[in-house]
Image: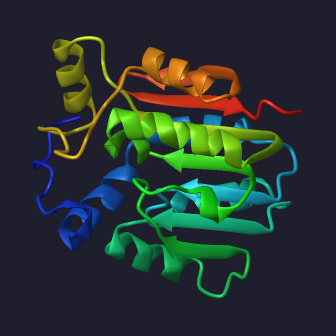
Amino acid sequence: MTPESPTPTGGWASEEQVDWYVERLSRLEQERTGELVLLDALADAPQRVLDLGCGDGHLAAAVLEARPSVNDVVAVDRSAPMLVRARGRFAGDSRVAVMNHDLGDSIERLGRFDVVVSGFAIHHLEHWRKRTLFEEIAASLSPGGVFLNLEVVASATPTLHQEFLELIGRTDDDPEDRLAPVEDQLVWMRSAGLTEVDCLWRWRGFALLVGQSATV
C-alpha cells in the first residue's frame, strides 16, 4: 500500500477529517478482519449494547446485523460530523439512540449493558482516563456481560510503529493519539475488575482487547 496524504488537521469536529477517516476505514482489510473477530466474540443473544465512540455507526450496525436479539443500542460520540452520519444511518430505527457524549466524561449515567463495544476510539484518551473508563465499563456490564475493544495500540519500537503507519497508508500520527501497549491495557482491564481478559486478535498496531463481567 502506498502512503496517502497526511492526516487532515482540524480534529474530529472537521468534516474533512471525518470524511478522510470514514473513506479510509472502508478500505482497510485488516480493520475489517478485526471487526469480524469482534463480532464472532459477541454473546449469543445480547439485548442491550453500548458503543463507545460510535463514529458513523458502522460498528453498531454490524452488531445489530450479527445479533438480531439486540433491541437497544446506545451509540455515543463527541464529533458533530460523526453524529450527523450516525443519526442518518439509524433514522427510523427505534432500537438505536445516538447521543453526544465525550469519553472523557463518566459513562455511569448511561446505564447497564450486556455488551460494551468500541472501535478505534479509546486510544484518544489519556492513559489515566483509559483506566477509569475501564472501571466504569466493568461496573456497567450486566452479569456475564462482555467488553470488546477494537483498538489502535502502541508498537514495541519506533521502527515497528513507522512500519505500521506505512502499511496502513499513513504518513504521520493523529495528534490526538495516546497509544498504550497491549500488555499495559490488559493489566488495567484486570485491575478494573474484568475477568477472562485477553487480546483475541492483533495485527501490528491493531488489537482486539476483551474482558467479561466479574459476576456470572
Q: Quadrant of residue 163?
A: top left
Indicate left or right for 207 with 123 as reference: right
Q: Which residue is depicted at the point 40% across and 41% down?
A: 129
Say if 91 sits above or below 49 in the image: below
Answer whether residue 30 is visible to the viewer in this image.
no
- Tell which of 112 and 95 is nearer to you: 112
Q: Which residue is depicted at the point 13% across and 57% down?
A: 8
Answer whether residue 135 is visible to the viewer in this image.
yes
Q: Residue furthest bottom?
A: 92
Q: In this figure, what is the number of numbered marks?
A: 0
Say if 87 sits above or below 199 in the image: below
Indicate left or right for 54 with 48 as reference: left
Q: Which residue is depicted at the point 59% across and 45% down?
A: 136
Q: Give x and y (percent) for residue 166.
A: 19, 30
Q: For the C terminus, give its image quadrant.
A: top right
Q: Give x and y (percent) for residue 7.
A: 15, 50
Q: Which residue is depicted at the point 38% across and 70% down?
A: 82
Say if 94 sits above or below 100 in the image: below
- Tell which of 175 and 200 is nearer to you: 175
Indicate left or right for 47 with 186 as reference: right
Q: Quadrant of residue 84?
A: bottom left
Q: For the N terminus, give its image quadrant.
A: top left
Q: Give x and y (percent) for residue 113.
A: 74, 54
- Tell which of 102 and 93 is nearer to you: 102
- Tell which of 109 and 51 is nearer to you: 109
Say if 35 sits above or below 15 in the image: above
